[in-house]
Image (tube, rainbow, N blue to C red):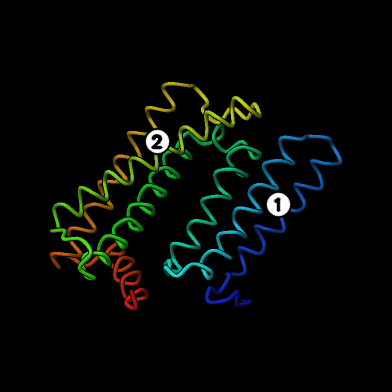
Amino acid sequence: MKKVNQYVVPKYIYLMWTTLLFAFAFGVYRQEWSTVFVSLATLIISIYSVWLSHHIKFRIPASLTTAAIIFIYATLFLGEVGGFYERFWWWDVVLHTGSAIGFGLIGAIILILLSRKGTVKADPILTAFFVFSFTVTIGVVWEIFEFAMDQLFGLHMQKSGLIDTMADLIVDSLGGLLAAGASYAYLTKRRVSALTKVLKEGVDENKRF
């Protein structure tokens, strides 16, 4: 594996980037401009995620950085170009749930750090509420993005329109509840799980704040 700053890029991420380059070239050859746009956008955003993981002072856990790259690839490229949303009914559910949990954990890490610094005072219940609200807000912003892409580029990201949007927001809320529960469990030290371990990693890596 090649180390990019402080984040080690897994080999399968390079394989994903290679497929994006091939898809971009194939799209140019076939003049399928939606494929060209989505492939290039996915490549740029995912590489930017790696760059961002080093150049911001806040250290995002490596597991979340990798998950973010995979999410971008699965959403924009596999979902739109590969047609996975039509092939697998559960594809959108899994992606929205996973992304909601990820954003919720990032929000929890930030609030925990602020509370330990003394900037804010937050008990476990208030922290959990903030995490849930933060997650749902991100979900709303994403739905606005999907609407904009559909209107500007005809990508049909919203699929069935209102039903798809509401289903996504419901799943986002469920993911937010899981992240909120993990933050509450972490602060009260009631249970150790994969999510609480990610929280601990994020807090420990940012102790200098």
Q: Residue furthest right?
A: 29
Task: Check disc 2 and give the amino acid type.
Answer: Val
**Residue 99 percent location from the top left of the image:** 42, 49
**Residue 152 percent location from the top left of the image:** 63, 27
Foreground mark, 2 or 1, reads 2
**Residue 178 percent location from the top left of the image:** 26, 50
Label 2 secondary element? helix
What is the distance, in whole Å, between disc 2 and disc 1 at their CAs? 28 Å
The mark found on residue 75 in the picture is none
Residue 89, above or below 186? above
Task: Check disc 1 and give the amino acid type.
Answer: Leu
Q: Quadrant of residue 191?
A: bottom left
Towards the viewer: 199 or 16:
199
* Residue picked out by circle 1: 20
Left or right? Give the position of 106 relative to 57.
Answer: left
Give me the residue at 23% from left, 64% from top: 119
Label 1 secondary element? helix
The tag earlier along the polypeptide, 2 or 1, is 1
* Residue picked out by circle 2: 140
Count of marks, rendered view: 2
Q: For mark 2, does the 10 Å Cα neighbourhood hold few (<14), some (14 to 19), or many (20 or more) residues?
A: some
Residue 21, above or below 79? below
Residue 137, above or below 15? above
Give me the residue at 51% from left, 51% from top: 71
State which quarter of the image contains the C terminus.
bottom left
State which quarter of the image contains the N terminus.
bottom right
Left or right? Give the position of 12 relative to 189.
Answer: right
Left or right? Give the position of 28 relative to 188.
Answer: right
Q: Quadrant of residue 110?
A: bottom left
**Residue 157 percent location from the top left of the image:** 55, 31
